[in-house]
Image (cartoon, rainbow, N blue to C red):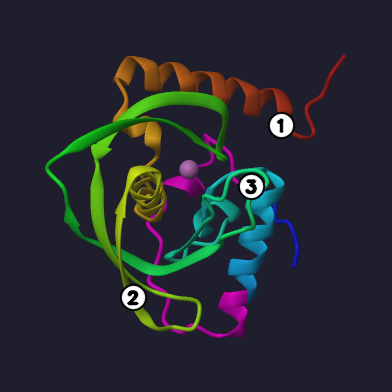
Amino acid sequence: MSIKPLIILPDPILRQVSKPVERVDGDLRRLADDMLETMYDAPGIGLAAIQVGEPRRLLVIDLAKEGEPPAPHVFINPEILVSSDQRSVYEEGCLSIPDYYAEVERPAAVRVKYLDRDGKLQEIEAEGLMATCLQHEIDHLNGILFIDHISKLKRDMVVKKFKKLAKEKAPGRMVG
Ligand code: NI
Protein backbone atom coordinates (compact mmCIF):
# COMPACT_ATOMS: atom_id res chain seq x y z
CA MET A 1 0.00 0.00 0.00
CA SER A 2 1.13 3.53 -0.54
CA ILE A 3 0.00 7.07 0.17
CA LYS A 4 -0.82 8.97 -2.99
CA PRO A 5 -0.58 12.73 -3.49
CA LEU A 6 -3.95 14.47 -3.26
CA ILE A 7 -5.28 16.64 -6.07
CA ILE A 8 -6.08 20.09 -4.68
CA LEU A 9 -8.41 22.87 -5.86
CA PRO A 10 -8.22 24.54 -8.44
CA ASP A 11 -6.67 21.59 -10.34
CA PRO A 12 -8.99 21.00 -13.35
CA ILE A 13 -8.63 17.22 -12.85
CA LEU A 14 -11.23 17.57 -10.09
CA ARG A 15 -13.77 18.64 -12.73
CA GLN A 16 -13.37 15.48 -14.83
CA VAL A 17 -16.25 13.02 -14.99
CA SER A 18 -14.92 9.61 -13.91
CA LYS A 19 -15.44 6.52 -16.07
CA PRO A 20 -17.20 3.35 -14.90
CA VAL A 21 -14.96 0.57 -13.60
CA GLU A 22 -15.11 -2.32 -16.05
CA ARG A 23 -13.30 -4.98 -14.04
CA VAL A 24 -12.93 -5.43 -10.32
CA ASP A 25 -9.47 -7.00 -10.24
CA GLY A 26 -6.29 -6.93 -8.18
CA ASP A 27 -5.21 -3.59 -9.66
CA LEU A 28 -8.47 -1.96 -8.66
CA ARG A 29 -8.33 -3.44 -5.15
CA ARG A 30 -4.76 -2.15 -4.81
CA LEU A 31 -5.95 1.33 -5.82
CA ALA A 32 -8.77 1.10 -3.24
CA ASP A 33 -6.25 0.08 -0.55
CA ASP A 34 -3.96 2.98 -1.51
CA MET A 35 -6.92 5.34 -1.33
CA LEU A 36 -7.84 4.07 2.14
CA GLU A 37 -4.25 4.55 3.32
CA THR A 38 -4.17 8.04 1.78
CA MET A 39 -7.50 8.89 3.44
CA TYR A 40 -6.42 7.62 6.89
CA ASP A 41 -3.16 9.55 6.60
CA ALA A 42 -4.88 12.85 5.71
CA PRO A 43 -7.03 12.15 7.85
CA GLY A 44 -10.45 12.06 6.22
CA ILE A 45 -13.64 10.00 6.19
CA GLY A 46 -14.17 9.70 2.43
CA LEU A 47 -12.11 9.82 -0.75
CA ALA A 48 -12.94 9.49 -4.45
CA ALA A 49 -10.41 8.05 -6.92
CA ILE A 50 -10.32 11.31 -8.90
CA GLN A 51 -8.83 12.98 -5.81
CA VAL A 52 -5.69 10.91 -6.35
CA GLY A 53 -5.83 11.57 -10.09
CA GLU A 54 -7.63 8.36 -11.14
CA PRO A 55 -10.79 9.15 -13.14
CA ARG A 56 -12.54 5.90 -12.18
CA ARG A 57 -15.88 5.51 -10.44
CA LEU A 58 -14.46 4.28 -7.16
CA LEU A 59 -14.67 5.72 -3.67
CA VAL A 60 -13.79 4.74 -0.13
CA ILE A 61 -15.47 5.74 3.14
CA ASP A 62 -14.69 5.01 6.80
CA LEU A 63 -16.85 6.70 9.41
CA ALA A 64 -15.29 4.98 12.43
CA LYS A 65 -14.55 7.50 15.19
CA GLU A 66 -11.19 7.84 16.88
CA GLY A 67 -10.56 4.84 19.11
CA GLU A 68 -13.04 2.64 17.22
CA PRO A 69 -11.79 -0.19 14.99
CA PRO A 70 -11.50 0.80 11.30
CA ALA A 71 -14.64 0.22 9.19
CA PRO A 72 -13.49 0.65 5.59
CA HIS A 73 -16.11 0.64 2.84
CA VAL A 74 -15.30 0.41 -0.88
CA PHE A 75 -17.94 1.56 -3.38
CA ILE A 76 -17.42 0.78 -7.07
CA ASN A 77 -19.68 2.33 -9.75
CA PRO A 78 -22.02 3.72 -7.06
CA GLU A 79 -25.38 4.99 -8.25
CA ILE A 80 -28.05 6.81 -6.26
CA LEU A 81 -31.37 4.99 -6.80
CA VAL A 82 -33.59 7.00 -4.45
CA SER A 83 -33.12 10.27 -2.54
CA SER A 84 -35.40 11.27 0.34
CA ASP A 85 -37.53 14.41 0.13
CA GLN A 86 -36.43 15.16 3.66
CA ARG A 87 -33.20 17.15 3.72
CA SER A 88 -30.47 17.66 6.26
CA VAL A 89 -27.60 20.06 6.73
CA TYR A 90 -24.02 19.03 7.56
CA GLU A 91 -20.86 21.02 7.81
CA GLU A 92 -18.74 19.49 5.03
CA GLY A 93 -15.08 19.62 4.21
CA CYS A 94 -13.00 18.02 1.47
CA LEU A 95 -9.43 16.72 1.31
CA SER A 96 -9.10 18.54 -2.03
CA ILE A 97 -10.11 21.85 -0.40
CA PRO A 98 -8.08 21.67 2.83
CA ASP A 99 -9.12 23.66 5.90
CA TYR A 100 -12.35 24.96 4.39
CA TYR A 101 -15.73 23.96 5.81
CA ALA A 102 -19.27 25.02 4.94
CA GLU A 103 -22.81 23.90 5.64
CA VAL A 104 -24.38 21.97 2.78
CA GLU A 105 -28.00 20.87 2.49
CA ARG A 106 -28.67 17.51 0.83
CA PRO A 107 -31.29 14.74 0.91
CA ALA A 108 -31.20 13.20 4.40
CA ALA A 109 -31.29 9.60 3.12
CA VAL A 110 -30.30 7.80 -0.08
CA ARG A 111 -30.44 4.30 -1.46
CA VAL A 112 -27.28 3.50 -3.41
CA LYS A 113 -26.36 0.49 -5.51
CA TYR A 114 -22.70 -0.35 -6.05
CA LEU A 115 -20.20 -3.15 -6.48
CA ASP A 116 -18.17 -4.11 -3.43
CA ARG A 117 -14.43 -4.90 -3.48
CA ASP A 118 -15.25 -8.45 -4.60
CA GLY A 119 -17.29 -7.13 -7.53
CA LYS A 120 -20.57 -8.20 -5.93
CA LEU A 121 -23.66 -6.05 -6.50
CA GLN A 122 -24.84 -4.46 -3.24
CA GLU A 123 -27.37 -1.92 -2.08
CA ILE A 124 -27.18 0.35 0.95
CA GLU A 125 -29.88 2.43 2.64
CA ALA A 126 -27.88 5.29 4.07
CA GLU A 127 -28.86 8.13 6.37
CA GLY A 128 -27.06 10.63 8.56
CA LEU A 129 -23.36 11.10 7.95
CA MET A 130 -23.15 8.07 5.61
CA ALA A 131 -25.81 9.59 3.33
CA THR A 132 -24.00 12.93 3.23
CA CYS A 133 -20.62 11.32 2.68
CA LEU A 134 -21.89 9.08 -0.14
CA GLN A 135 -23.49 12.03 -1.93
CA HIS A 136 -20.35 14.16 -1.48
CA GLU A 137 -18.11 11.41 -2.91
CA ILE A 138 -20.48 10.47 -5.75
CA ASP A 139 -20.50 14.18 -6.67
CA HIS A 140 -16.69 13.91 -7.07
CA LEU A 141 -17.18 11.15 -9.65
CA ASN A 142 -19.26 13.65 -11.65
CA GLY A 143 -16.76 16.49 -11.32
CA ILE A 144 -18.86 18.24 -8.67
CA LEU A 145 -17.39 19.69 -5.47
CA PHE A 146 -19.23 20.54 -2.24
CA ILE A 147 -18.53 24.23 -2.85
CA ASP A 148 -20.86 23.95 -5.87
CA HIS A 149 -23.68 23.61 -3.33
CA ILE A 150 -22.92 26.87 -1.48
CA SER A 151 -23.55 30.46 -2.59
CA LYS A 152 -21.65 31.75 -5.63
CA LEU A 153 -20.21 34.54 -3.54
CA LYS A 154 -18.69 32.13 -1.00
CA ARG A 155 -17.55 29.74 -3.75
CA ASP A 156 -15.79 32.49 -5.71
CA MET A 157 -13.96 33.54 -2.54
CA VAL A 158 -12.73 29.98 -1.86
CA VAL A 159 -11.65 29.39 -5.45
CA LYS A 160 -9.80 32.72 -5.50
CA LYS A 161 -7.98 31.84 -2.28
CA PHE A 162 -6.90 28.43 -3.58
CA LYS A 163 -5.81 29.87 -6.94
CA LYS A 164 -3.60 32.29 -5.06
CA LEU A 165 -2.17 29.50 -2.87
CA ALA A 166 -1.46 27.34 -5.95
CA LYS A 167 0.35 30.24 -7.58
CA GLU A 168 2.50 30.78 -4.50
CA LYS A 169 3.40 27.11 -4.43
CA ALA A 170 4.07 26.82 -8.17
CA PRO A 171 7.45 25.18 -8.76
CA GLY A 172 10.17 26.92 -10.71
CA ARG A 173 9.07 30.39 -9.79
CA MET A 174 11.96 32.81 -9.96
CA VAL A 175 12.49 34.82 -6.83
CA GLY A 176 14.88 37.78 -6.71
NI1 NI B 1 -14.37 15.77 -1.17
Dot 1 or dot 2, earlier in sequence: 2
Question: Could you tell me which quadrant the N terminus lies in?
Answer: bottom right
Magenta residues span 6-29
Please name the amino acid that badge 1 sits on: Ala
Q: Which residue is mark 3?
A: 6
Mark 2 residue crowding within 10 angstroms, few (<14) / some (14–19) / many (20+): few
x 24%, y 48%: residue: 109
- Residue 43 image point, x, y percent: 65, 43
x 40%, y 39%: residue: 145
- Residue 115 image point, x, y percent: 39, 76
Q: Which residue is mark 1?
A: 170
Mark 2 to mark 3: distance in Å? 28 Å
Query: Element under label 2?
Result: strand
Please name the amino acid that badge 3 sits on: Leu
| 172, 22: nearer the viewer | 22
- Asked if the residues shown at circle 1 and circle 2 are in contact, with their CB atoms under 8 angstroms apart, the answer is no
| Marks 3, 1: nearer the viewer | 3
Dot 2 or dot 3, earlier in sequence: 3
Q: Which residue is mark 2?
A: 122
Dot 3 or dot 1, earlier in sequence: 3
Please name the amino acid that badge 2 sits on: Gln
- Residue 60 image point, x, y percent: 51, 59
- Residue 84 image point, x, y percent: 16, 47
Mark 1 to mark 2: distance in Å? 43 Å
Which quadrant of the figure has residue 154?
Answer: top left
Whether 36 is drawn above or below 175: the answer is: below
Whether 126 is drawn above or below 96: the answer is: below
